[in-house]
Image (tube, grey):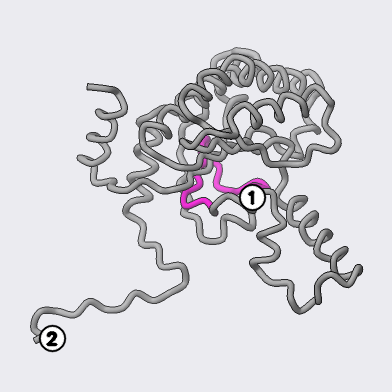
Amino acid sequence: MAEGDFLEMATTALGIGAPPRHVALIMDGNGRWAAARGLPRFEGHRRGVEALRRAVRAAIDLKISYLTVYSFSAENWSRPREEVQSLLGLLHRFIRNDLAELHANNVRVRVIGARSDLAPEIGDLLREAEQVTQGNSGLTLVVAFNYGARQEIATAVRALAEMVAKGEIAPESIDVESISAHLDTADIPDPDLIIRTSGEQRLSNFLLWQAAYAEFVFLPILWPDFDRAAMIAAIQEYAHRDRRFGRVEAPRRSAKTAS
């Protein structure tokens, strides 16, 4: 029996049913994982890449359509230069070493975040990942790199303001849909489930607009320890949530009332 078939049977037995269409991951705790073991922070980030590989493979097997990972925030540039360079080096190695496997598994890579001020070699690397996999129809792996939700919203609002100034649209025509259409995620459905590891319970400037009706699961484990079991546990928790999107569920009619 193939591993994916076994995983599908396991999730059915756990009562998960249909998985969420879009799962987003805040991969937190690499540094604390390393510090707890007396290792350099870089080793925590390296082990974090291994956890990312496990997450992608689990998402494929669970038939999740979109997996968004918070790989590098706009605020991460303020970290020590050596750590930033290590993170960029891991991104480079991940794409170089894993792009062929992602492509072979029908994964489409999408990158969100500001690119105008990135070093040319980083920008070229991100474009290559998108271009090589753009024709794939399986899991869409959305990599949030140099990403900040507030910055994303500000950029969208600025674009709409410029359109108003040019007379292309009227101010009263700006609504939720028009703002959404100018975000980096315009062609991506909003996340159903956002998972954050390390026990922290905040979004940290991640998908603020898109998370309006997302379910949140906060796991106590540190990111390098994230595996298939953790993914299944989070989805099982999600499966038991009652998602009404602001509506009141109609009361169920009993057999006596119906008659």
**In the image, is residue 101 part of the stretch drawn in magenta?**
no
Instruction: Name the quadrant containing residue 110.
Output: top right
Specify the farthest residue to the front: 135
Q: Is residue 174 left or right of residue 231?
A: right
Pinpoint residue 120: horizontal percent, then vertical percent.
84, 25
| Mark drawn on residue 161 | none
From the image, give the main secondary structure of the stretch colored magenta. loop
Pinpoint residue 9: horizontal percent, then vertical percent.
22, 35
Q: Inspect the image, locate mark 1, and give the three-letter code of the amino acid beneath it.
A: Thr
**In the image, is residue 192 part of the stretch drawn in magenta?**
yes
Cα separation between marks 1 and 2: 46 Å
Q: Is residue 137 left or right of residue 180?
A: left
Q: In the image, which is nearer the foreground, mark 1 or mark 2? A: 1
What residue would you read off at disc 1? 185
What residue would you read off at disc 2? 257
- Neighbour tally class for label 2: few under 14, some 14-19, many 20 plus, Cα within 10 Å: few
Q: Is residue 35 shown to the viewer in this render?
A: no
Compared with residue 246, is residue 79 higher up or lower down, i.e. above or below?
above
Instruction: Name the quadrant containing residue 108.
Output: top right
Quadrant containing the N terminus in the rendered view: top left
Q: Residue at x 43, y 34 (%)?
A: 59
Which residues are drawn in magenta? Answer: 190-207
Q: Is residue 150 shown to the viewer in this render?
A: yes
Quadrant containing the C terminus in the rendered view: bottom left
